[in-house]
Image: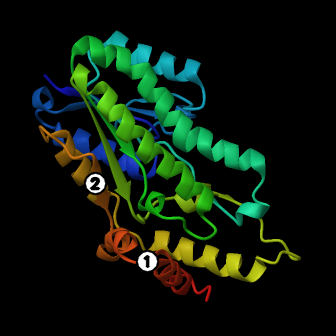
């Protein structure tokens, strides 16, 4: 019997790559493969999707519950949920509008938590389930001009550590997967605080923004993430945290643990050309 997989934010980027990879693995033997459902705020825009896209806005609990209810009308169980929907945000924190900060946390933190809350009753009834959360290597450190994004992903990492322990008794697994830079359209969909002519951050923010966009453009193929997710889904006892990215990006987390704070800070400043 195929595993039912729900992927939020399945219309593009990493979510789309994961869904297509799992669908391709299911051909020509869907019996032992995956039945994939993705979500999008505007599924009608993606009629060529390789798997069904349901309408869902992770900022709306009614929308989340409606999508899950629709899935359960078609199948008897939900084996895997992949919380992938998210937004990027850049800018000096001082100049980032409060409304945009809240919007980023609503999508990157409250959204996944609300999806988990909505699916837990079904997984508890089943006695099994696996929830994977796509976080970010950026969530392991405060990055200049990306502080709000880093904070929203860090919050999700920590909350899931707690929820994992709370739900183990029900046979439910939770896993965080932190990607580095991948070649997706996330940069185009980010909220960028405008570079203001009279801003004291104008030069540094402008240069850092250019560097960040170059990192995404030159990032790894999202297929790498899809393969890792597939491997984790098939793991009997998955780890709590996985990091997927370049050796340098993963090593940066190790360095943060090892180096004195100010030494690590100077390293980041040099990396972004800020000192």
Q: Is residue 144 left or right of residue 52?
A: right
Quadrant housing residue 48: top left
Q: Position of residue 85 (x, y in %)?
A: 48, 42
Instruction: Give me the C-alpha separation between circle 2 and circle 1.
Output: 24 Å
Helix, strand or loop status at disc 1: loop
Viewer can see residue 183: yes
Q: Residue at x 21, y 16 (%)?
A: 127
Q: Position of residue 129 (x, y in %)?
A: 25, 26
The correct choice, above or below, for 11 with respect to 68 in the image is below
Q: Is residue 93 left or right of residue 111?
A: right
Q: Residue at x 69, y 75 (%)?
A: 205
Quadrant housing residue 218: bottom left
Q: Position of residue 45 (x, y in %)?
A: 55, 38
Q: Position of residue 167 (x, y in %)?
A: 30, 26
The correct choice, above or below, for 61 with respect to 271 in the image is above
Classed neighbour count for the residue bearing mark 1: other residues with Cα under 10 Å, few (<14), some (14–19), many (≥20) = few
In-front residue for pair 157/66: 157
The correct choice, above or below, for 133 with respect to 227 in the image is above
Classed neighbour count for the residue bearing mark 2: other residues with Cα under 10 Å, few (<14), some (14–19), many (≥20) = some
Helix, strand or loop status at disc 2: strand
Q: Quadrant of the C terminus?
A: bottom right
Viewer can see residue 10: no
Q: Nearer the viewer, mark 2 or mark 1?
A: 1
Residue indicated by mark 2: 242
Residue indicated by mark 1: 260
**Pointer 2 or 1: first along the chain:** 2
Q: Quadrant of the N terminus?
A: top left
Q: Is residue 142 left or right of residue 128?
A: right
Q: How is the image coloured?
A: rainbow
């Amino acid at each position: 019997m195929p595993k039912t997989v729900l992927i939020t934010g399945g219309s593009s980027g990493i979510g789309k790559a994961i869904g297509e990879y799992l669908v391709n693995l299911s051909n020509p033997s869907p019996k032992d493969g995956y039945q994939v459902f993705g979500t999008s705020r505007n599924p009608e825009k993606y009629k060529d999707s390789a798997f069904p896209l349901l309408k869902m806005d992770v900022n709306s609990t009614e929308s989340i519950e409606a999508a899950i209810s629709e899935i359960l009308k078609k199948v008897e169980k939900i084996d895997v949920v992949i919380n992938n929907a998210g937004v990027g945000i850049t800018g000096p924190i001082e100049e980032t509008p409060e409304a945009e900060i809240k919007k980023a946390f609503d999508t990157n933190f409250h959204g996944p938590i609300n999806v988990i809350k909505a699916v837990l009753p079904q997984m508890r009834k089943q006695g099994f389930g696996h929830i994977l959360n796509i976080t970010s290597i950026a969530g392991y450190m405060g990055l200049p001009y990306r502080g709000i994004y880093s904070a929203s992903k860090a919050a999700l990492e920590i909350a899931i550590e707690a929820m994992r322990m709370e739900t183990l008794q029900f046979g439910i697994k939770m896993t965080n997967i932190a990607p580095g830079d991948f070649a997706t359209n996330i940069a185009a969909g980010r909220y960028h605080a405008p570079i203001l002519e009279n801003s004291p951050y104008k030069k540094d923010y402008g240069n850092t923004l250019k560097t960040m966009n170059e990192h995404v453009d030159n990032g790894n193929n999202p297929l790498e993430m899809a393969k890792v997710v597939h491997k984790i889904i098939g793991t009997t006892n998955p780890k709590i945290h996985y990091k997927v990215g370049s050796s340098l990006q993963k090593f940066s987390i190790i360095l943060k643990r090892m180096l004195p704070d100010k030494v690590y800070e100077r390293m980041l400043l040099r990396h972004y050309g800020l000192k």
